Amino acid sequence: NSTYGTGGMLSKLTATKMAVSLGIPVVITGKEDSLENIKEGKTTGTFFKPSKPLKQSKKLFAMMEEPKGVVYIDEGAYRALKDGKSLLPAGIKRVEGSFNRGQVVVLYTQDGLLAGKGKTNFSSEELKKVLGKKGEEVKRILKTNKEEAIHRDNLVVF
């Protein structure tokens, strides 16, 4: 807490980013605002309009499943995700935690910006073997026909 009321602001903004990407409107305001004022649009706080709603299945895993690990991605990968592409191992810089195929991980940029959440096609150990690698090399090393670390259908980008 401070004189200027910035205590926990990073947490508030991270939660706001996640909520609006899931189609949920958010108001950050001071204690002087009542819920009635906010519902009537008379808030003195800041209103964050939600993004287009996600498919129900994406909302469910984004909100309900606890992440089992963290994957750090480069800026090129983040731009690709924002354009609706899948996450490829070529854009992964670091993997933390221990997770299996099909488990949820949280994605961060190298700068620590929350980028998204997704269900992995590979375990943490498999991903560590193919960090920065491209398509055919990933398939050869992991003896699989998949090259996406996280397919776009199993990904929520914040």
Image (cartoon, helix red, strand yellow):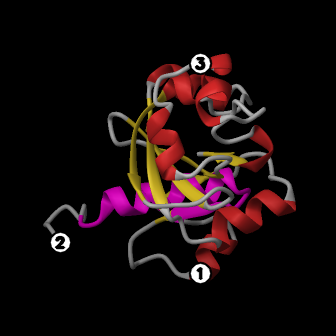
| Marks 1,2: beta carbons within 8 A | no
Disc 2 marks a residue whose amino acid type is Asn
147 to the left or right of 98: right
**Cα gap from disc 2 to disc 3, whole angstroms:** 46 Å
Q: Secondary structure at mark 3?
A: loop
Between disc 1 and disc 3, the foreground one is 3
Residue matched to label 3: 134
- Which label was assigned to residue 125? none
Question: Measuring 61% from the left and 60% from the top, which residue is drawn there?
Answer: 104
Nearest the viewer among 106 and 99 is 99
When the figure is inspected, residue 136 is found, relative to residue 61, above or below; the finding is above
| Residue 116 vs residue 46, the one in the foreground | 116
Which residue is depicted at the point 70% across and 57% down?
A: 22
Return the residue at label 1. Answer: 35
Q: Position of residue 72 (x, y in %)?
A: 42, 40
Disc 1 to disc 2, C-alpha distance: 23 Å
User: Which residue does the image show at 75% across and 39% down from the upper left?
Assistant: 152
Specify the quadrant that holds the C terminus. Answer: top right
**Residue to which mark 2 is pinned:** 1
Span of residues in magenta: 7-27
